Image (cartoon, grey):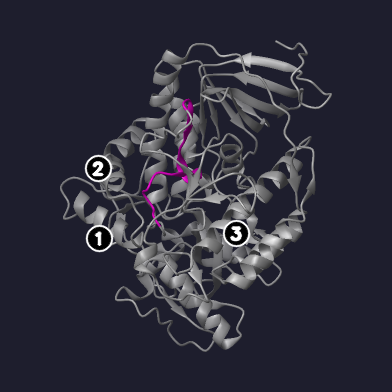
């Protein structure tokens, strides 16, 4: 229906309206898992996608999952996850998600996914940082995300997926969700729906260089905060230890999977000396430990990067074709020379506060995948737990969203006027990279907060403008939460508080979209 109605969104009004039972925002692993689950329950499901690529597609390492008839166990996987999470995981959430992993992977295989085999009918397993067992299944060597995305895209081919649709606001009446405000090529519109699932991915483009695709601009964090829903553990931004180094590199940079280290690659500094993590797992320590060790070595030496020596890996090209191609595109032959790497912004361990079914404290609003904080990751995500969580919680969120839509009726959404501000994206990224990167301190975080306070009014008339607003809101949240945590824990490293404080072994939830927002 394409008729104009008065709505309180400036003088433009709304150009179109539609109805659905469930709206899913995002088309990565969590979004499509949610949409497929909802669709298969007979729900009128609309999927909104603003960008052609997803973080899922770029995932290299694999899916951490406990397989039957191996020496692994759910208890061991839970123990490894809790250890990596540095005291902030929710043990019940970890147990619930890990225990459901094999079923979720089996469902993905039913949808057409195919994983590498070590023998006919037997999936090949590798090991990554923080894992005590070889429990990572993979596809195409180091192209697991591409295979997961392919299978889900194929299964979702008949779904109602709206491309180039930017979600601007989750609409609600103060007590429950009523729909989504959207901009597309036809203008401003509303999808009226009682259930909305945020599966918008991460926030990597808060920083100058990241492993994330261009669409990872913190949209879901901003949408939740504007709807009055809290975000938890947002200070814990994981920097992957090994992003391909490029002196002029900005934007999305290739990830060099830690599965290389699981197969024997070794980290060395510019003089060829092995890295020291002071951790019993060495180069296979959790990501926060390795990233911090690299950062410390670079600060001490003044070097621009360290090196990952993978020349000892047999059949390197065949086992890691994605890494090999990325290196060769940069003029590096990993079979003959070490790979230059640096830590890079990679994954948000915190996010919109949910339970293990994706439910937030606003009835009708759900979140799954990287945008959500279920308690699975705590202060530092264990390698390859992200696709696992996306599959499990995504499907659960889709089913729970359908259940809610059955009881909520057909709401009529109304739009409220909201003033937005944004900082120039390059200025924001430079400030975040300087003051809220691998190591932070109070002086830098306060300087960052002051910079973010200089944001100016911005109308969200284009995708880029909407992303700039979301980045600014999300940056304020990260800065506020990081400034409040006066300790080092997981992937939050404070140079002025280098030790963990047992009295701060708790999660904080933030409400509001300003740097001075309430923390509790």
**In this view of the protein, which residue sits in the foreground, 473 or 124?**
473
Q: Earlier in the sequence, mark 3 or mark 1?
A: 1
Query: Is residue 472 shown to the viewer in this render?
Result: yes
**Which quadrant is the N terminus positioned in?**
top right
Q: Residue at x 57, y 60 (%)?
A: 254
Q: Mark 2 — residue?
A: 99
Q: Quadrant of residue 263?
A: bottom left
Q: Mark 3 — residue?
A: 479
| Labels 3 and 1 touching (C-beta < 8 A) | no
Residue 362 horizontal/vertical position (percent):
48, 30
Q: Quadrant of residue 515?
A: bottom right
**In this view of the protein, which residue sits in the foreground, 358 or 485?**
485
Does the stretch in magenta take in 371?
A: yes
| Labels 2 and 1 touching (C-beta < 8 A) | no
Task: Identify the secondary structure beneath mark 3.
Answer: helix
| Labels 2 and 3 touching (C-beta < 8 A) | no
491 versus 161 height, above or below: below
Task: Identify the secondary structure beneath mark 1.
Answer: loop
Q: Mark 1 — residue?
A: 133
**In this view of the protein, which residue sits in the foreground, 138 or 391?**
391
Q: Nearer the viewer, mark 2 or mark 3?
A: 3
Look at the image and give the residue range highlighted in magenta: 363-378
């Amino acid at each position: 229906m394409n008729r104009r109605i008065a709505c309180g969104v400036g003088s433009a009004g709304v150009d179109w309206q539609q109805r659905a039972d469930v709206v899913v925002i995002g088309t990565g692993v969590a979004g499509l898992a949610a949409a497929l689950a909802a669709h298969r329950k007979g729900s009128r499901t609309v999927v909104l996608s603003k960008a052609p690529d997803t973080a899922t597609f770029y995932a290299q390492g694999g899916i951490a999952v406990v397989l039957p008839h191996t020496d692994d166990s759910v208890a061991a996987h839970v123990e490894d996850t809790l250890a990596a999470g540095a005291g902030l995981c929710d043990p019940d959430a970890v147990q619930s998600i890990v225990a459901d992993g094999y079923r979720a992977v089996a469902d993905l295989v039913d949808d057409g996914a195919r994983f590498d085999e070590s023998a006919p009918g037997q999936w090949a397993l590798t090991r990554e940082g923080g894992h005590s067992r070889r429990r990572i299944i993979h596809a195409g060597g180091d192209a697991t995300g591409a295979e997961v995305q392919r299978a889900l895209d194929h299964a979702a081919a008949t779904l109602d997926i709206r491309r180039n649709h930017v979600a601007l606001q989750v609409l609600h009446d103060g007590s429950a969700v009523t729909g989504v405000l959207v901009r597309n090529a036809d203008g401003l519109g509303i999808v009226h729906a009682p259930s909305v699932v945020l599966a918008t991915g991460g926030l990597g483009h808060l920083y100058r260089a990241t492993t994330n695709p261009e669409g990872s601009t913190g949209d879901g964090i901003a949408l939740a905060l504007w709807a009055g829903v809290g975000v938890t553990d947002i200070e814990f931004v994981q920097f992957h230890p090994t992003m391909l180094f490029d002196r002029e590199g900005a934007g999305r940079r290739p990830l060099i999977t830690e599965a290389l280290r699981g197969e024997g690659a070794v980290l060395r500094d510019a003089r060829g000396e092995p890295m020291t993590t002071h951790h019993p797992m060495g180069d296979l320590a959790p990501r926060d430990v390795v990233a911090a060790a690299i950062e410390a070595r670079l600060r001490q030496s003044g070097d621009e990067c360290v090196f990952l020596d993978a020349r000892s890996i047999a059949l390197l090209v065949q086992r890691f074709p994605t890494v090999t191609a990325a290196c060769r595109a940069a003029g590096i032959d990993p079979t003959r020379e070490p790979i230059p790497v640096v830590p890079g912004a990679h994954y948000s361990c915190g996010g919109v506060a949910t339970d293990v079914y994706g439910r937030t404290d606003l009835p009708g609003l759900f979140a799954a995948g990287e945008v959500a904080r279920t308690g699975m990751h705590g202060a530092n995500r264990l390698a390859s737990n992200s696709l696992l969580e996306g599959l499990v919680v995504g499907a659960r969120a889709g089913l729970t969203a359908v259940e809610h839509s059955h009881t909520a009726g057909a709401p009529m959404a109304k739009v409220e006027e909201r003033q937005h501000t944004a900082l120039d994206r390059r200025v924001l990224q430079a400030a975040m990279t300087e003051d809220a990167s691998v190591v932070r301190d109070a002086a830098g975080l306060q300087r960052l907060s002051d910079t973010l306070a200089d944001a100016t009014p911005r109308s969200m008339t284009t995708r880029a403008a909407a992303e700039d607003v979301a980045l600014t809101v999300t940056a304020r949240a990260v800065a506020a939460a990081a400034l409040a945590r006066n300790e080092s824990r997981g992937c939050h490293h404070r140079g002025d508080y280098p030790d963990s404080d047992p009295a701060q072994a708790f999660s904080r939830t933030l409400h509001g979209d300003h740097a001075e927002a309430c923390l509790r």
